[in-house]
């Protein structure tokens, strides 16, 4: 007869303890296959517990297949493969190395924002309002392209601040631009050839390659993507940032935009992905107009994100598809659920609707401008000022230092890292011969500590000398 | 001389109005290419505005390429392509048909939860706490696989409630299981052949197909995925739900689990994706043990989601990779940003850590059980009870009605829809000859209104007669 010391069971319930004990005996071969188990009543009497407890344990063993029942006879042990179950792993044992990031003195690479710049109290208030007022809507199935309220205010925003005429039905909201790129790849299929800017934001080509999409690197001239290189390439879809190219900062002029649109208009399967990732942060003049707004032939897919303008850890981005593509997009990929929580979509919609977003952008633009001015001042006041030329400082969250030095870019970056300063160089973003792009340091100032700038500038001076 | 009526400018600033007016004149050919613009001083005097305003407008036109400057001479109009700019679209004009969902009397298909079942006040309190206390952490760059706090409590949860021994470093958090499937496809590459259950949850094969991954349908027998069909197939990765198959509700017994693991162990490139989507909602006995917990050879990728257990509009799911796969996963796809907002990750971590999740699950299990009991009672008390057999009612958020009727499944669904009742049938989830699976109606009761059940049962009775 099965006998277990029920007092050793600790916190587990009687039924669970009994189930586990019998299961272990079966697994370890102490009760062998086809052996008949005692009747529920007999075992209950033997262990001085209720029949219901035994019944529950037997039911669980039955559902999981450790025992089987024969009508009017009782329960029998199933035949299992021997030596299948070894001892379980300890939880501590799983051997995975998680790389730990080191703290550094000054990070000119990080794209993050300081806590004092995020509107925590407003965001908290709006979240609370949304949770109080929107109970039922928050739990309703969302449209695949995001909640209507958010798409509506985004369309309004694009009209007022970017001069773009789009319907909320053209907008697709997703958890980050990286996710939207993935959707576009599935939409267009793997047979496209994608033209990416060289130099350019390297994650873009990483994503296309992770999806087995053929990528061509297309060079830039002073006006952005080279038309002659584009014409020579086999690409049918290009991914560009005409308002503010990363990392060179080039603004594509109207003539080149016309040429690029002409290229797209020549063939039916040609499209342009316009990545407008930091258009909010131009320090002088108006925002640069978008390619989308002068596209008359539905050739431009516009992408933008709130990760730069609000916070990189709130994962909300969106794209605007031309109307004729939106129809087929819905048919092909409309089965996907929207990847952004409705709670945050409603909160963001309210944040924009009530004017907080506009104010936040203005405040951040001023903040970034003052960060930029501070670094430029420190550079100009130090001996470093004589050895560098500052390029592309009118927009975005970075500028470029054209440095006069004999060191290689690799040496510069490594020496900086030894001193606790993280920097990147333009040449890192370029495929092929890097001669022309050498000695250009990218200074991202989105989240640096102003008090440490002088020290960092002095360190950079030591390095390039 | 350029002359504009500055009083007509409405709300726009002087500089913006001037910029737009000159741009339009250039685009419309009123000022022709190579024509010299008046000097800033002259135009300012002429329009009686400040030189700075003119300078700002000229700068914007210059940056965007509408004009160019010649040193010591002044500004000239650029050569643009003619007839490029037509009138802009009206915002109302974008012609997209957004399908509107009709309201229905009773939806036995919807997978949503009622507002009264979501713990709004707790969630709101925790969100506020997180926003107050975690300022800096909320904005820090996240690990690609999600924040450590959440992975930690998930590992604890899996240990206590699913008997799984996993490290937090094996866990990858993502915005919904659909997104995680996409990551797995990129990880394994397109050359895999994926075996999916037939019948099964149709979205799974839709996603694999949208990614151009070859899919094979593998039939089920009474114990789940058929081993003989699996052996015959060319699949090397299979996607299964052993704890509770959708839609049949089959629980895979231990013997079949051993066979499936043996199949995977035979070849190095074979893996099993275990989709444990609703394991929390078993009404009788303990949760069914996972395949992952008896896998000794790192062959099982375990996936689960909070969309069923908390709310479908909070997009948080996770997967547990075997240690050796996690290393290569990080190398191949670690460049991706985590797709779930850190705000909600911290909130969920706290929700689990403080025991709210466990209590919520228990409350929901009782709620679903009472919903199920209510429908079963109404069915048994009506004449419908004589005409149906109720299958698989022990778990999940649905059961199956095996119906005795001469109507086809299509007729049943259409007649129900006409009466405002949404139902689906098992045969919809099956590829190939549907003979065996006919007349099985799936009744999903996750969010139905109890007061309408009697009426809906009567309607169903009319339909199948």
Image: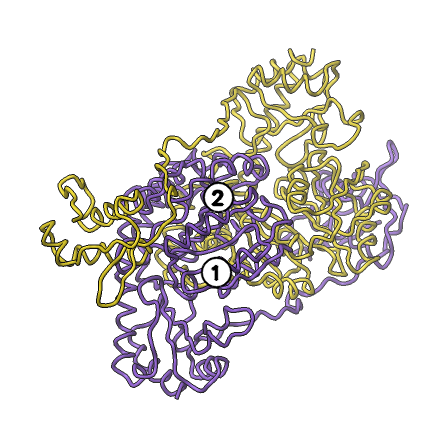
Chain colours: A purple, B yellow
**Label disc, if present, on residue B304 of the rendered structure:** none
Q: Mark 1 points at which residue?
A: A226
Residue A138 in the figure: left or right of residue A66: left
Asked if badge 1 and badge 2 are on a common chain, one would say: yes
**Callout 1–callout 2 Cβ contact below 8 Å:** no
Inspect this view and state whether residue A237 appears: yes
| Image spot of residue B369 (x, y percent) | 60, 32
Task: Name the spot of residue A236 as percent of width and height, x first.
Answer: 57, 50
Query: For mark 1, does the 10 Å Cα neighbourhood hold few (<14), some (14 to 19), or many (20 or more) residues?
Result: some
Task: Find residue A454 and report its image quarter.
Answer: bottom left
Q: In the picture shown, does residue B368 fall above or below B383?
A: below
Q: Distance between the residues labelled 1 and 2?
A: 19 Å
Question: In the structure shown, which secondary structural element does the residue marked by tag 1 occupy?
Answer: loop
Total marks drawn? 2
Give the side of residue A354 with respect to residue B213, left or right: left
Where residue A193 sits: x, y (%)?
60, 53
Q: Is residue A334 left or right of residue B222?
A: left
Task: Estimate how packed mark 2 is, as few (under 14), some (14 to 19) or many (20 or more) residues with alpha carbons within 10 Å.
Answer: many
Q: Mark 2 points at which residue?
A: A299
Front position in the image: A170 or A11: A170
Which mark sits nearer the N-terminus, 1 or 2?
1
Closest to the observer: B361 or A356?
A356
Relative to A351, say whether A225 is above or below: below
């Amino acid at each position: 007869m099965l006998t277990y010391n029920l007092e050793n069971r600790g916190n587990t319930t009687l039924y669970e303890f009994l189930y586990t004990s019998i299961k272990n005996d079966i697994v370890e071969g102490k009760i062998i296959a086809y052996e008949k188990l005692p009747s529920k009543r007999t075992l209950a009497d033997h262990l001085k517990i209720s029949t219901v407890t035994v019944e529950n344990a037997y039911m669980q063993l039955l559902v999981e297949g450790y025992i089987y029942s024969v009508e009017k006879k009782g329960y029998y042990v199933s035949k299992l493969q021997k030596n299948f179950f070894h001892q379980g792993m300890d939880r501590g044992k799983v051997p995975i190395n998680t790389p730990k990031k080191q703290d550094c003195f000054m990070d000119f690479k990080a794209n993050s924002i300081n806590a004092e710049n995020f509107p925590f109290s407003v965001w908290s208030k709006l979240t609370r309002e949304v949770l109080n007022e929107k109970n039922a809507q928050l739990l309703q199935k969302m449209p695949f392209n995001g909640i209507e309220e958010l798409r509506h205010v985004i369309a309004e925003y694009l009209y007022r601040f970017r001069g773009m005429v789009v319907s909320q039905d053209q907008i697709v909201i997703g958890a980050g631009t990286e996710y939207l790129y993935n959707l576009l790849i599935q939409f267009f299929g793997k047979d496209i050839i994608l033209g990416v800017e060289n130099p350019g934001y390297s994650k873009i080509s990483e994503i296309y390659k992770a999806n087995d999409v053929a990528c061509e690197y297309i060079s830039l001239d002073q006006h952005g993507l080279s038309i002659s290189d584009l014409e020579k390439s086999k690409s049918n879809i290009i991914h560009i940032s005409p308002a503010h190219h990363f990392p060179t900062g080039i603004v594509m002029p109207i003539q080149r935009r016309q040429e690029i649109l002409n290229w797209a208009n020549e063939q039916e399967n040609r499209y342009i992905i316009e990545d407008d990732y930091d258009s909010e942060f131009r320090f002088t003049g108006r925002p640069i107009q978008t390619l989308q707004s002068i596209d008359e032939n539905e050739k431009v897919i516009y992408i933008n994100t709130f990760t730069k303008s609000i916070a990189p850890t709130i994962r909300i981005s969106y794209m605007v598809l031309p109307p004729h593509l939106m129809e087929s997009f819905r048919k092909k990929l409309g089965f996907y659920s929207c990847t952004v929580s409705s709670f945050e979509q409603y909160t963001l919609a309210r944040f924009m609707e009530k004017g907080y977003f506009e104010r936040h952008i203005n405040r951040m633009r001023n903040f970034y401008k003052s960060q930029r001015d501070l670094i430029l001042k420190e550079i100009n006041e130090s001996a470093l000022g004589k050895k560098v030329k500052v390029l592309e400082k009118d927009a975005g969250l970075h500028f470029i230092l054209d440095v006069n030095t004999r060191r290689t870019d690799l040496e510069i970056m490594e020496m900086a890292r030894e001193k606790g300063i993280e920097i990147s160089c333009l040449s890192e973003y370029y495929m092929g011969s890097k001669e022309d792009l050498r000695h250009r340091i990218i200074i991202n100032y989105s989240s640096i500590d102003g008090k440490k700038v002088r020290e960092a500038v002095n360190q950079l001076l030591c390095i390039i000398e």
